[in-house]
Image: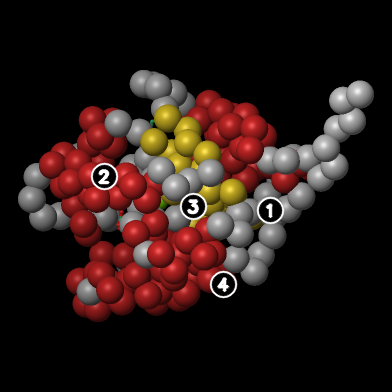
Amino acid sequence: MDLLRGVNIYLVGMMGAGKTTVGRILARKLKYRFFDTDELIVRVANQSIAEIFEREGEEAFRELETKVLGELSAYKNSVVATGGGIVARSMNWGYLHYGVVVWLDVPVDQLYDRLRSDTARPLLREGEIKSKLQSLLNERERFYTQADVRVSTRGGERPEEVAARAIEEIKKVIKPETAPDLN
Ligand SMILES: Nc1ncnc2c1ncn2[C@@H]1O[C@H](COP(=O)(O)OP(=O)(O)O)[C@@H](O)[C@H]1O
Ligand SMILES: O=C(O)C1=C[C@@H](OP(=O)(O)O)[C@@H](O)[C@H](O)C1
Ligand SMILES: [Mg+2]
């Protein structure tokens, strides 16, 4: 999309919202590169996300997350799927706001259906999954609402459809370089 002029797209939202899945499709549609902060963290640390949480703790993971995000902010023409907790650090917004931030807003019941058998997300390992998702959303919603664009999924939308709708919403917030002469 020429209108974007290479500006990065950052996908934010809860675990299970589809950032990784939709992000990949969005990149293909926009002819952008695709990056996932979690994937880069795993590569840099040479450990899985669960191992980093277990051996080094969440704070160490958050440090790596900020570092990776900072490095990505030097790139253009990229769709970046972030981890659900990236929004909670104000420093990260300094990087996110270089691009267009898109919140994939999905009801907790749907997140739960997608993640009920998940083993890769350490924050869901303790306690009851649905109430953990709800309490994380309660903590984070005020950050997610700072996104430039909100894409709320209606039930049963396929990732392809969510990506198409994200593009329509992104178009609405991009200002053309020169305002069209309406006279
Ligand atoms: N629109 C969708 N409809 C149904 N399942 C989806 C949708 N988007 C993602 N999923 C599934 O939900 C799970 C979590 O998706 P993922 O992209 O990893 O989310 P996130 O990166 O936001 O945590 C995956 O199994 C994925 O296939
Ligand atoms: O919500 C979170 O704090 C996290 C979300 C995960 O990514 P996804 O949002 O892609 O699941 C991953 O970064 C880590 O397990 C922590
Ligand atoms: Mg992901």
For residue 71, the mark is 4
Q: Is residue 157 above or below residue 122?
A: above
For residue 7, the mark is 1
Please report the residue visible at 23 percent of the width from the left and 44 percent of the height from the top: 138
SS category of the residue bearing label 4: helix
Q: Amino acid at mark 4?
A: Glu
Name the residue beneath numbered marker 3.
81
Please report the residue visible at 60 percent of the width from the left and 66 percent of the height from the top: 73
CA gap, disc 1 and disc 2: 28 Å
Would you say the residues marked 1 and 2 are in contact, meaning their CB atoms lie under 8 Å apart? no
Please report the residue visible at 53 percent of the width from the left and 48 percent of the height from the top: 101
Disc on the earlier residue, 3 or 4: 4
CA gap, disc 3 and disc 4: 14 Å
CA gap, disc 1 and disc 3: 14 Å
CA gap, disc 2 and disc 3: 18 Å
Determine whether the beta carbon of the residue marked 3 sits less than 8 angstroms from the nearest atom of ligand 3.
yes
Name the residue beneath numbered marker 2.
137
Residue 151, position as x, y percentages in the image? 47, 33
Q: Amino acid at mark 2?
A: Leu
Please report the residue visible at 25 percent of the width from the left and 34 percent of the height from the top: 108
Would you say the residues marked 3 and 4 are in contact, meaning their CB atoms lie under 8 Å apart? no
Q: Nearer the viewer, residue 179 or 53?
A: 179
Q: Is residue 78 above or below residue 4?
A: below
In the picture, residue 168 is in which quadrant? top right
Using a 10 Å C-alpha cutoff, classify the residue at mark 4 as few (fewer than 14 neighbours), some (14 to 19) or many (20 or more). few
In the picture, residue 175 is in which quadrant? top right
Residue 5, position as x, y percentages in the image? 76, 50
Q: Is residue 45 left or right of residue 135?
A: right
CA gap, disc 2 and disc 4: 27 Å
The quarter in which the C terminus is drawn is top right
Q: Amino acid at mark 3?
A: Ala
